[in-house]
Amino acid sequence: MMQVSQAIARRMSVRAFRPDPVSGAVVREILEMAHRTPSGGNLQPWRVYAIAGDDLAAFKALVAETSLEAPQYDVYPPSLWEPFRTRRFECGEDLYGAIAIPREDKAARLRQLSRNAKFFDAPVALFFCLDRRLGPPQWADVGMYMQSVMLLAVERGLDTCAQEFWARYPRTVAQFVGLPDDHMVFSGMAMGYRDEAHPINAWRTRRDPFEAWGQMRGFG
């Protein structure tokens, strides 16, 4: 059986998927098991929508005809400062470098960005939402739930890519899934089987050493 440490090491943001379908029973099992994720006061603030098959095709066709919408929250703070600015810059440069898109080729970079709207060809799309009256602690709870989903997917031989990209289409997503007016879209996620042959899946994001962000005191 796969260990948690192995699932964490295997998990990555996959940006090229094979078309192989994923069983609805497996997706539901993952979502229900992830429901054991902790949340402050056991509020269980997440609301999840899973889409596949003809419904997913219809949604992608709708998005293709829809302009970007005003986001309902800032994915990043304006004017990022260090070390966050450098981390984000390096991530973008490394990603495009993995598929040989130079910095000056803006059109190619936009085409790659637009693949988010197709869930990178994954056969399953997930949307994670929550009551808009809830606060940052509950947003963190939803993030923990998403991490549980991603690790459980790895255990079953699947892969994922969390997509805050969908903050750009809050109204379209909400209308398509029938989201109540008092709820908002937090993030999407692509799920399926990674295309091992695609070069973008051979790339890994950098990680700073422990000393850059951690401290240990009082240990013998």
Image (tube, grey):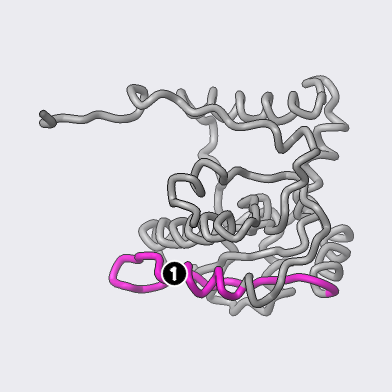
Expressed as whole percent of the image width and height from the top left, the position of residue 217 reads 15, 30
Expressed as whole percent of the image width and height from the top left, the position of residue 144 reads 43, 57
Label 1: which residue? 133
Q: Is residue 18 above or below residue 29?
A: above
Q: In this view, does 206 lie above or below 43?
A: above
Specify whether residue 46 is painted magenta: yes
Specify whether residue 43 is painted magenta: yes
Please provide the residue range marked out in magenta.
28-54
Q: Which residue is drawn at 82% across and 72% down?
A: 53
Location of residue 176 by image quarter: bottom right
- Disc 1 marks a residue whose amino acid type is Arg
Q: Quadrant of the C terminus?
A: top left
Q: Residue at x 72, y 49 (%)?
A: 194
Foreground pick, 115 / 9: 9
Q: Is residue 93 above or below residue 69?
A: above
User: Mark 1 Cα within 10 Å, few/some/many (few <14, many 20+)?
Assistant: few
Q: In this view, does 134 lie above or below 147?
A: below
Q: Which residue is drawn at 54% across and 27% down?
A: 206
Expressed as whole percent of the image width and height from the top left, the position of residue 209 reads 40, 23
Location of residue 56 by image quarter: bottom right
Expressed as whole percent of the image width and height from the top left, the position of residue 165 reads 67, 50
Foreground pick, 62 / 127: 127
Q: Residue at x 65, y 77 (%)?
A: 25
Location of residue 93 by image quarter: top right
The local secondary structure at tag 1 comes to: loop
